[in-house]
Amino acid sequence: MPEHFALYSSTLESLPTHEMRQLAGDAEFAVHEDADGRRFTYEWANFTIICHEMPAPQVANHLQGFAGWVMRVCQSKPDDRANRILDRIRATRLVVRLSVEPLRDEAGVAEQLLATLSQGLDAILFFDSAIYDKQCLLLLGDDGTFDEEARLADQQPAKPLQLTESQKARYERALAALRARQVPTPAHALYVEDESVVRLRSAADVARRVLVLSAVTLRADGGSRERVLKVIADFDLANAVTPEEHAFLHSDSHEVETAQKLLWRFESLWLLLWALGELDELSWPGAMCDVPTLILTTMLFEIDRDFVRNARLRSKPEILDAAQTTWLMHEAIHDAAREQRPIPDNLDWSSGAKMVPVRLCPVIGVVHERRHALNWLMSSHASDWDDIS
């Protein structure tokens, strides 16, 4: 699987193309630009590095989510050091997402390029649920730890985030839905991006992903390999199948643990069916989805050769509303896990349900899969389902 990093710079607003080209050395170098920003690609024989410059309109909301992560680590009680990190995040002018595929090389070329970018951008680095300074010393781990030697220059706080009325209204609707069930809400507001910024996947791409997930879950549930491969072939879905899914679907046998993990994709599939308007509403995530109905629905798709061509998405506001509520629910689960607090086994704090440790709650996977599907749906620049954060 690829390794993913994010660089945050307060000194530049864009990557200098000439200098980025000079970093290529003996690698094949290319620049690609579209509505999702610029991508600088460095390709060697055994690995590839892609630097994706986040479009400026997306930066503010992204930074808000990043600041929310810091607040969660600090349990909403940041000390002076954490406040300096928050100020540094808010002062960010450029975000660069960097991926190394499949992994960093043994010779250290990838690490050298990463270090050069960190130094040149005077950046902080996010990797593997931790923040590092430009010397790659730990500024803040997800457990609150840090390296005493890590250094962070003082920065002037950025201007406050300018929210649209649509974002504010959406956030209030999500809060109302959660408070109706007494779900703990975060002290630090977390807003999904505005409609003007978000670009959804096409309805055809969502329909193809539905067919792929149908094949994956059928195979994970013990279904015939020949049948699922026929679906992939009949709908020409080879390019829509991820490497992990390809290996699973073509294997004669598979580990029980892998099959169980992929069976949770029923919940992602349920969310995508809702996004295509095949379900009237997205129910509270307090129970697993209706698997028999789901299977029957997808079986009908498999015999409808016009399914992909005729697919239509729900409105963008509806999808963003679901994303906002799901994100806040996800944060409530994360906060409970971090603070070792029990949660209701149906995620409804108002119902008098049995309280259980987070790891024993039977439906946290429902929220996880819904958020994964929503993040994929709202990330038109990402090419691989498996790479969605």
Image (cartoon, rainbow, N blue to C red):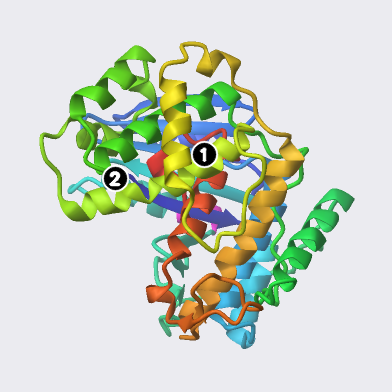
Amino acid at dot 1: His
Number of residues whose C-alpha sits closer than 10 Å to that of mark 2, classed few (under 14), some (14–19) or many (20 or more): few
Q: Which residue is mark 2?
A: 1
Q: Position of residue 359 (x, y in %)?
A: 38, 74
State whether residue 299 is above or below residue 135.
above
Front residue (pair 180, 239): 180
**Cα distance in 3D space between marks 1 and 2:** 18 Å
Q: Quadrant of the N terminus?
A: top left
Front residue (pair 14, 265): 265
Query: Is residue 25 one of those drawn in magenta?
Result: no
What span is colored magenta in the figure?
118-122
Q: Which residue is mark 1?
A: 52
Q: Position of residue 80 (x, y in %)?
A: 63, 87
Q: Position of residue 383 (x, y in %)?
A: 45, 32
Identify which residue is drawn at 61% across, 57% down.
Answer: 326
Q: Position of residue 155 (x, y in %)?
A: 68, 69
Quarter residue 201 falls in: top right
- Helix, strand or loop at label 2? It is loop
Q: Nearer the viewer, mark 1 or mark 2?
A: 2
Amino acid at dot 2: Met
State whether residue 117 is above or below residue 378.
below
> Can the viewer see residue 288?
yes
